[in-house]
Image: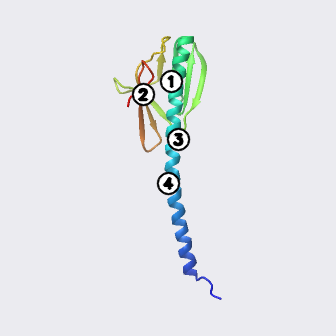
Amino acid sequence: MRAFTLIETLATVVLLATIASVGAIGLAGASDAAKMQEAEAVLRSTDADARNLARTSGVVRLTLDDARTTLRLVSAGELVLERQSPIPMHLVDPESDTPMHAVIFEPTGRSQDYIAVLDDGGEKHTITISGLTGWTAP
């Protein structure tokens, strides 16, 4: 009866570790893409809710917390809605390219145009949102 040698066993372990690491890297990339899509969905739904709330309740402010992961809607000084984003983001005024502390939604449901920059520490993804419609620019 023949047994495996130490070299054969080590070669098999190295091969399996290499295959596992390649698979883990592929899964990590898919996870990052899913987080980016979730962050976009959180932003889009919060923007839509802000517009609807402004039409029924008056002026609404969209703000971010200090960690830039919690979106908050405030109306008449009261916190109305809070949503978590899996990726930090910041808001930018597209005309002056300066940071925005809040987006104000008028009772008509309109706001100024703004850009949300999603920053996962590596790749930055920008979403330009129309103040008139809430639609994103291509």
Three-letter residue code for mark 2: Thr
Q: How is the image coloured?
A: rainbow
What residue is drawn where x is 50% and y is 11%?
107
Which residue position holds label 4?
Answer: 26
Element class at badge 3: helix
Q: CA distance from mark 3 to mark 4?
A: 15 Å
Three-letter residue code for mark 1: Asp
Q: CA distance from mark 3 to mark 2?
A: 19 Å
Number of numbered tags placed on the structure image: 4
Counting residues from the start of the chain, the first of labels 1 and 2 encountered is: 1
Which residue position holds label 2?
Answer: 136
Three-letter residue code for mark 4: Gly
**Crowd class of label 2 (few under 14; some 14 to 19; many from 20; radius 10 Å):** some
What number is the disc on residue 25?
A: none
Which residue position holds label 3?
Answer: 35
Which residue position holds label 1?
Answer: 47
Q: Nearer the viewer, mark 1 or mark 2?
A: 2
Q: Nearer the viewer, mark 3 or mark 2?
A: 2
72 horizontally vs 122: left or right: right
Percent of width and height locating residue 135: 43, 25
